[in-house]
Image (tube, helix red, strand yellow):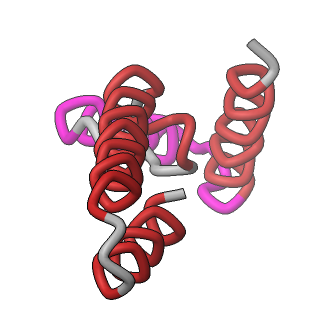
Amino acid sequence: MCVLAIGGMIVASVTDHNGVAIATGLIAAVAIVCLILVTAVAGPEAFGVRPPVDEAAAADLERRIDALVASGADEAELRSLVRAAGRMYRRSSADR
């Protein structure tokens, strides 16, 4: 919409249609404000952006994995289980 409005402003200005140029400029301004509002309200999840990693939680998870491996658990199997739990959580979060 913004690109069309900018094109309309240029064409209207060249052909000396000042009212049309102002109207298309206002349309571009409204479209820009709408884009800003949608971006602000939707949040990063709506755009496929991953949330930042919680370093403290990651360190705690790694500490727990190390403790289980030290007590005899198979590390590869344990890490596979953690990955599967993460995939399950992401799928259930996406359904909300």
**Residue 50 image point, x, y percent:** 45, 48
Report which quarter residue 64 is drawn in.
top left
Instruction: Please state, as top left, top right, bottom left or bottom right, where the C terminus lies in the image.
Output: top right
Up-down relation of residue 5 to residue 24 (above or below): below
Q: Is residue 36 left or right of residue 96?
A: left
Of the pair 72 and 46, the residue shown nearer to us:
46
| Residue shown at the point (45%, 62%) measured from the top left | 5
Q: What stretch is highlighted in magenta?
A: 55-76
Q: Can residue 66 be seen in this view?
A: no
Instruction: Please state, as top left, top right, bottom left or bottom right, where the N terminus lies in the image.
Output: bottom right
Magenta portion: prevailing SS class = helix
Magenta stretch encompasses residue 56: yes
Q: Can residue 73 be seen in this view?
A: yes
| Residue shown at the point (41%, 33%) measured from the top left | 34
Of the pair 88 and 8, the residue shown nearer to us:
8
**Residue 6 image point, x, y percent:** 38, 70
| Residue shown at the point (25%, 35%) measured from the top left | 54
Up-down relation of residue 38 to residue 11 (above or below): above
Report which quarter residue 65 is drawn in.
top left
Q: Which residue lies furthest to the top in this view?
A: 96
